[in-house]
Image: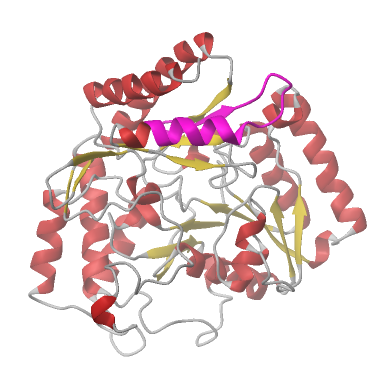
Amino acid sequence: MTTATLSQTELLSPVWTHLTDIQPVKGEGIYLYDEEENRYTDFTSGIGVVNTGHCHPKVVEAIQQQSTELLFGQMNCVIPPTTVKLAEKLNTLTPEHINRFFFANSGAEATEACVKLAKQATGRQHVIVFQGSFHGRTHMAMAMTTSKTVYRYKYQPLPGGVFVSPFPASYYYGWSEDEATDFCLQQLDLLFQGQTAPEETAAIIIEPILGEGGYTPAPAKFLQKLREICDEHGILLVLDEVQSGFGRTGKLFCFEHAEVKPDIIVMAKGLGSGLPISGIASTEEIMSKWLPGTHGGTYGGGSAIASAAACATIDVIYEEGLIENAAARGAQLMEGLRKLQEKYPVIGDIRGKGLMVGTEFTKADGKPDPETTSRVLQACLKKKLLLLSCGSYKNVLRWIPPLVVTEEQIEEALEIFAEAMSNEQ
C-alpha cells in the first residue's frame, strides 16, 4: 500500500486511543471547530491543558511576539530570559518556602525529575505512591501508575523501589471519609513495617485529586497526616499537581485546600495553555543537593516560546479571575449534577473541587457501571459535548472545562447531560 492510498489517519500509530475522530482546525474559548465549521463544546480541555481556553488572545500574542525574537536557547549553553521570568513569576505564587524551579516538557518528565531529585536529596532509594494514581507513561512514571492496567500492560517488569499504598477513596470502600482516612493511614504504617522502611524511603508522592484514577479528592486530614509522617521520618512529600494545578480546583494548586506544605510540587498541563512545558518546584535546601549534570535534557527549560506562553497563562489566570470563576462554576456544576442524581440513582457519587468534577455511575448492587458511563458519554458526544471517562473501572465521567467557561455554558452542558441521562430511563 502506498501513502497515496492511505486514509488521512492511517499513517498515525494505532497506540493512541481516540475519544472522537474530529479533526479540529480552530479553537476558541471552550469550543473546537472542524473544517465544516461544526462547533464542539470541549469539556475535556485537552485533559486539563487549556485552562485559559483554546487560543486565548493574550497567550497567542505572547507566542507570536516571542517567536520573532528567540525560539530556543539550550539551558546548558545559555539561559533564556523568558525561562528566568517564568521562575520569577512562579516564585511569587508558590508557598514562601518553595523557591527553586526546574523545567521540562511533559508531566512524565517532571515525575521522573522529582524522583531523581528526591533520591539525591535524601540519599534513599524508594518511593511510595497510592492506588489509583497516574504519574505518567515513561518507565519510572509507569511503575508509579496504578489507575489502569492498560498503562502497564505487557511492559513489566518495571523499575523497582516503588511501593503502593491504599488511597482514601471513601465512596469505593463504602465508608465515611474519616473511616477511609484512618484505614489508609493504618495501611501506610503497615507498608512501612512490611515493605519499605522509612529510612530507605525518599518520597511519598500523591495526587491531591486522583486524575485517571477517578477524580477522587484526598481528604485534607489525610494530606495533613502525610505531612506529619514525612516530617517524622525525613521523607519528602511530593504533590503531583499536573492535572489539578493552575486554578483548576478553585485554588492555584489543589494542596492549598488542605493547607499543607509540599517539599516538591510537580506541574504541567495547565501551565502552558497547550504548549509543552512542565516543571518541578522545591526549596533551595533540597535543590542544592541535586548534583549539577546528573539530570537535564535538550529541550527542558530551553523553549523560549513555551516559557512565554506559560508567563502569559499565569497573567491571564489572575487578570481574568479564572481561579474564582473555577470555584463558582464548579459549585454551579456540582449543584446541577446533584439535582440530576436525585432523579437518576445510577449516578452513585459526585465529587471534586472547582472545575475538576467526577460523576461515578454505579449499578443497583453497588458495582461499577462502565456500560452506562459509556452510553451517556456517547450520547453527549452526539450532541457535540466532549467529556472523558476515567477510573479503574471506567465508570466515572470527568468534567474539566476550560476555566473561562461561563454560567450559561455550564447550564447548556448540564442540559445535554440531562438529555443523555433521560435516555437511560
Q: Please check the rendered image and state whether residue 368 is part of the magenta-colored stretch, yes or no.
A: yes
Seen as rendered, the residue at the extreme bottom is: 77
- Viewed as shown, does residue 268 lie left or right of 363? left
- Viewed as shown, does residue 416 lie left or right of 102? left
Between 148 and 52, which is closer to the camera in this rendering? 148
Q: Is residue 78 above or below residue 132?
A: below
Seen as rendered, the residue at the extreme right is: 194
Q: Residue 138, how many percent across, how many down?
A: 56, 71
- Viewed as shown, does residue 193 lie left or right of 280? right
Query: Can the viewer see residue 368 in this picture?
Result: yes
Between 113 and 232, which is closer to the camera in this rendering? 113
Q: Is residue 190 above or below residue 126?
A: above
Query: Can the viewer see residue 250 in this picture?
Result: no
- Viewed as shown, does residue 10 lie left or right of 352? left
Q: Residue 327, how many percent across, how many down?
A: 37, 28
Residue at 50% in and 88% down: 293
Q: Is residue 326 above or below residue 209?
A: above
Q: How is the image coloured?
A: secondary structure
Q: Residue 28, how many percent across, how many down?
A: 16, 45
Residue at 79% in and 32% down: 182
Q: Please check the rendered image and state whether residue 403 is part of the magenta-colored stretch, yes or no.
A: no
Q: How many numbered tags mark residues here?
A: 0
Q: Quarter of the image containing the N terminus?
A: bottom left
Q: Residue 93, how many percent across, how many down?
A: 36, 49
Q: Is residue 44 above or below residue 12?
A: above
Residue at 12% in and 48% down: 36
Q: Identify the magenta region.
A: 353-379
